[in-house]
Image: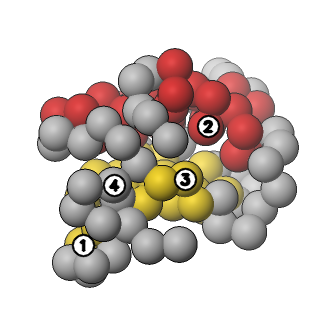
Amino acid sequence: MVGTQERPRLCVYRSIGHIYAQVIDDRAGKTLVSASSNDGKTKESLKAVETSLQPKSSARAIAERAKAAGIEKVVFDRGGYKYHGRVKALADAAREAGLKF
């Protein structure tokens, strides 16, 4: 799976406590935008939220930042994780926020 300038790759990484997302242009070798449940503003709003709800906030943040950068279409890279739980929640919330994949 390769992200291009027209359709960059939305890459997901999840750890036990957090979830991370990056929009990457593989041809240029650059991360265009990123967001995580460990970001400053996102982290403040998620202090009292359980881990199953963290992906929604991270997905909204990544979608807003991607739209600000002029990105609407992406390729979803689940990073080898099953499309279930927090990974699925992030994908669904990113779609709801306006990203197309």
Residue at 20% in and 78% down = 28
Q: Of marks 4 and 2, which one's residue comes earlier in the chain?
A: 4
Whole-percent x, y for residue 94 in the image: 50, 31
Q: Say the numbered circle drawn on residue 76.
A: 3
**Residue tagged 2:** 90
Q: Of marks 1 and 3, which one's residue comes earlier in the chain?
A: 1
Observer-nearest residue: 12 or 9? 9
- Give the Cα distance between marks 4 and 1: 13 Å
Amino acid type shown at disc 3: Phe
Whole-percent x, y for residue 56 in the image: 58, 27
Mark 3: secondary structure:
strand
Circle 1 residues within 10 Å: few <14, some 14–19, many ≥20: few
Residue 42 visible here: no
Q: Are marks 3 and 2 in contact (CB under 8 Å)?
A: no
- Give the Cα distance between marks 3 and 4: 10 Å
Q: Are marks 4 and 1 in contact (CB under 8 Å)?
A: no
Circle 2 residues within 10 Å: few <14, some 14–19, many ≥20: many
Mark 4: secondary structure:
loop
Q: Of marks 1 and 2, which one's residue comes earlier in the chain?
A: 1
Q: Of marks 4 and 1, which one's residue comes earlier in the chain?
A: 4
Observer-nearest residue: 69 or 17? 69
Q: Say the numbered circle drawn on residue 30.
A: 1
29 left or right of 98 in image = left
Answer with the quarter of the image where residue 69 lies. Answer: top left
Above/below status of 4 relative to 61: below
Amino acid type shown at disc 2: Leu
